[in-house]
Image (cartoon, helix red, strand yellow):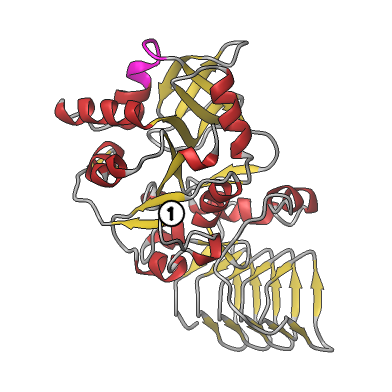
Amino acid sequence: MTGKNIVGIVFSSEYDECMPELTGLRTMGSVPFAGRYRLIDFALSNMVNAGIERVGVITKSNYQSLLDHLGNGKAWDLSRKSKGLFILPPFSTVEQNGNVDKINSIFGSMGYISRCKEEYILLVDCNTIINVKIKDLMNYHAEKNADITILYGHGTAPSISDTMCFDVNDDGKIIQVAVGPHNRESQDFSLGAILMKKSLLERLINEAHSMNFGSFENDIIQRNVSKLSVYGYKAEGFYRVLDSMISYFNASMDLLNPDNCDDLFNPERPIYTKVKDDMPATYGITSNVKNSLVANGCIIDGEVENSIIFRGVRIEKGAVVKNSIIMQESYIAESSSLNCIVTDKSVVITPNKNLSGTENFPIYIGKGIVI
């Protein structure tokens, strides 16, 4: 099996309701992360690093920001005369348990999927932050002669209504699937990447749609785990599944650990994103920056500690930013103090303001707000 024989499908709007603060004006896939990336960058980069040349992105709503970011797919080498990146049109469907109905979203894109000549299909969600070697997943799938292979992690499962948790035997076969939020701290749970033959997916989706099934996890995976050969491939290294604003904040802060950052941004498997030409970050003589990620185009004259600063942010002399995420083109005026704050794009903090949240309850400031 090679990447050229796989078509990738990315669900850009899956789990938008988990982070309404950040997805009110954008999809999950276009949520900014780590100073210069969007969440969809990880899914796309994992695919192209494995040699996958055809990728379809399923959208639903609030996708203008996503379209602006993806463009023609050039940043991921997916701007091609044949194959390449395809934005699949919004689908009309109900929502199940607050989540996008994945069965109907795939069924609505079945025309595109059926025209693809690749033998296999890889389904990926956008709320998982991971840099995984998809080639190893492909080889594992072939070695086990599996019908379905699911990427999974071990630990505390995300608090999402359709999270799949597994019982995996010594051979790696999934023998039982439980769907729903779980409280155990040590368990195997899906990381939102599923590999199978395209013909199998078409059959399962058509059957589920004809019977008016609404849950991909319950009605396709759980229902068929005893009928099909379903295997789990365990991910190693740094990965995070976003299920809330707090999980987004914590995942961002975890990148300030150099080991986590080096694992996620492995130069052997680069994470690609839209290129924006800008000057390097500028640090004034009054600046003091500690243990932070600072993107290009920033002007720092104040104090920054344990924070992530996106492109084009300006922090004036006397301003203090700690344990915070400051998104693109925001402005922090002199003598202001921020602690455990998440600002969206183009936020302005006027002079002499003191804003403080906590690690368990960071304060979010919406796009374009002036305080």
Q: Is residue 194 visible?
A: yes
Q: Position of residue 96 (x, y in %)?
A: 26, 38
Q: Furthest-right residue in view?
A: 285
Above or below 106: residue 209: above
Quarter of the image containing the N terminus?
top right
Residue 64: quarter of image:
bottom left
Horizontal relation, residue 271 to residue 301: left or right? left
Q: Position of residue 291 (x, y in %)?
A: 79, 64
Using the image as rendered, state which of residue 56 and residue 329 is in the foreground.
56
Horizontal relation, residue 365 to residue 212: left or right? right
Count the labels in the image. 1
Q: Residue 335 colored magenta?
A: no
Residue type indicated by callout 1: Met
Horizontal relation, residue 146 to residue 200: left or right? right
Using the image as rendered, state which of residue 102 and residue 308 is in the foreground.
102
Q: Is residue 99 visible?
A: no
Q: Position of residue 250 (x, y in %)?
A: 62, 51
Using the image as rendered, state which of residue 177 and residue 227 is in the foreground.
227
Above or below 303: residue 238: above
* Residue stretch in magenta: 222-228
Q: Which residue is mark 1?
A: 19
**Residue at image location 68% in from the left, 42% down from the top:** 238
Q: Position of residue 135 (x, y in %)?
A: 61, 36
